[in-house]
Image (cartoon, helix red, strand yellow):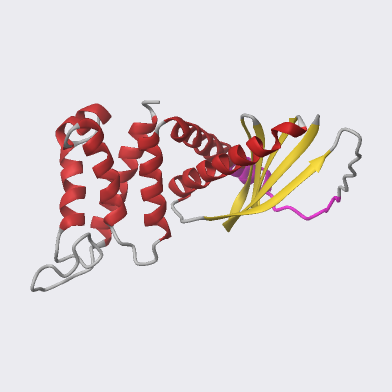
């Protein structure tokens, strides 16, 4: 049996360290490196490479939702430790002067990292078995990565559940979200006077950029749709 490590580069940098099981892999995410480790027979390598790619994309989509940013993913290669090989590990220890409240702040940051890690892993696992959730997260990732902040991808999230449940009213009931909120997302993103909406410039004018409150409302509703759908798998 060999130990395989598949590495991916994720950008931008993650300001936290994550370690979690994502069968068949043990995953670690640190700064810009996602490493997926597994012990398997040599004959399984092609299948494992494909699985690693699927897992990496699931993690990236979940990161985008949880952290509210767009992420790029690049495969960096793999390392194999054969059962006859050896591995050396170098550990360095640095001593620093800590402020008085360091341990308290470190504990709070650790709890937040653990909570975020749990949410990211749960969401990534759900989307591997729910193609509708995966589509929603893909739309959210497009929105998060768009420097212009166009609202079209958030409306696409709404359209997924409209198709899935047969309209906004049924979607609101199925997801236990406000029907008024769904209509609000549709209204703001479809306003032809809004330049970062779905149909910019379709009116004679005047034109405007969606207000901060409108953008925040659209994001909130899209997030609630995704969160509610994730609880169904």
- Looking at the rendering, the stretch of residues picked out in magenta corresponds to 92-109
- 48 or 17, which lies in front? 48
Mark yes or no: residue 57 visible: yes
Quarter holding the C terminus is top left
Q: In the drawing, does residue 144 fall left or right of residue 203?
A: right
Q: Which of 122 and 211 is in front in this view?
A: 122
Q: Is residue 30 left or right of residue 70?
A: right
- Name which residue lies at 28% across and 57% down: 151
Residue at the spot 20% in from the left edge and 28% down from the top edge: 173
Please provide percent x and percent y for residue 142.
39, 55
In the rendered image, the quadrant that contains the N terminus is: top right
Query: Residue 67's spot in the image, x, y percent?
Result: 47, 49
Does 21 sit left or right of 189 as displayed?
right
Quadrant in the picture for residue 25: top right
The answer to whether residue 112 shows anywhere in this view is: no
Residue visible at 63% across and 42% down in the picture? 104
Residue 24, picture quadrant? top right
């Amino acid at each position: 049996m060999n130990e395989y490590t598949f590495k991916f580069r994720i950008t931008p940098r993650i300001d936290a360290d994550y370690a979690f099981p994502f069968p068949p892999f043990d995953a670690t995410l640190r700064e810009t490196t996602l490493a997926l480790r597994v012990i398997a027979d040599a004959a399984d390598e092609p299948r494992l490479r494909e699985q690693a790619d699927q897992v990496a994309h699931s993690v990236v989509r979940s990161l985008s939702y949880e952290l509210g940013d767009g992420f790029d993913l690049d495969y960096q290669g793999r390392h194999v430790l054969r059962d006859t090989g050896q591995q050396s590990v170098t550990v360095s220890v640095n001593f620093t002067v800590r402020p008085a409240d360091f341990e308290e702040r470190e504990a709070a940051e650790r709890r937040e990292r653990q909570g975020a890690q749990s949410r990211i892993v749960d969401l990534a696992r759900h989307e591997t078995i729910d193609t509708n959730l995966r589509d929603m997260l893909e739309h959210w990732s497009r929105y998060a990565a768009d420097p212009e902040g166009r609202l079209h991808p958030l409306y696409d999230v709404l359209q997924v559940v409209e198709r899935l449940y047969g309209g906004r009213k049924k979607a609101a009931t199925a997801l236990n979200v406000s029907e008024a909120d769904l209509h609000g997302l549709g209204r703001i993103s479809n306003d032809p006077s809004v330049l970062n909406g779905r149909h910019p410039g379709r009116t004679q004018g005047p034109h405007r950029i969606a207000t901060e409150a409108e953008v925040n409302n659209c994001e909130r509703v899209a997030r609630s749709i995704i969160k509610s759908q994730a609880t169904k798998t």
